[in-house]
Image: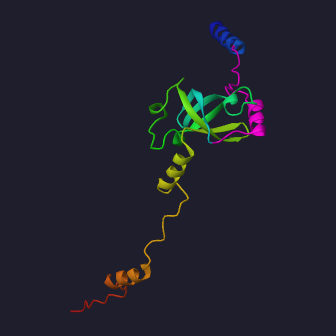
Amino acid sequence: TQQEADASQQAAKQKRERPQRQQQNNRRDDSAVLASLEKKGWDSNAFVEGTVVSMVDFGCFVRIDASQLNSECEGELDGLVHISALTSGRVGSVGDIVKLEDKVQVRVKSINGSKVSLTMLSAEEEETKTDSSPGGGSAPVGDGAKDWKDLLVKFDDKMPVFKNGPVIQNRRK
């Protein structure tokens, strides 16, 4: 019918007029600031003040002024504080520790390309965290008992011995 044809033409017209969705890229271009910092260096043990600009499930993004890291650098840069680097204890949620627009003290651990790794832990706290985390650190657990071979022999002597063999039953009666 004519009404159906008009309706389909109207829908096609609206579809053509609909603006196309633009690719969203909310990342700032910090490449010049990062290149300057990598070239001139920074103190990886120094804490600087930053502002929490974004929070995600795995951490928060903090904006810091590059001049706090090296007086010869200018501009701002954003870096990620991973949820495990927010505090030395266990963190249930990023929102439990920080909120948007909070002023926080962070330390730049590394700059890898366009990614800046930040932490809110001191170097000593990071060291003790990796040492005390169960299975998380690369620290050796220990040598164990010195007389482990003798203890194993004693343990084996106390254990019953199981042998698998055929079971013969006489069913003739």
- Does residue 160 appear in this view? no
Rendered view: 135 above or below 9: below
- Residue at 57% across, 46% down: 123
Question: Is 145 situated left or right of 125 in this image?
Answer: left
Q: Nearer the viewer, residue 62 or 37?
A: 37
- Residue at 52% across, 64% down: 140
Q: Nearer the viewer, residue 122 or 32?
A: 122
Region in magenta: 18-44
How many dots with numbers?
0
Rendered view: 59 above or below 18: below
Q: Nearer the viewer, residue 119 or 49?
A: 49
Q: Main structural element of the magenta stretch: helix, strand or loop?
A: loop
- Residue 100 image position (x, y, % from top left): 53, 24
Question: Is 39 situated left or right of 45 in this image?
Answer: right
The outermost residue toward the front is 71
Name the image quarter holding the C terminus: bottom left
* Corner quadrant of residue 156: bottom left
Rendered view: 2 above or below 87: above
- Residue 29 image position (x, y, % from top left): 73, 28
- Residue 171 image position (x, y, % from top left): 25, 89
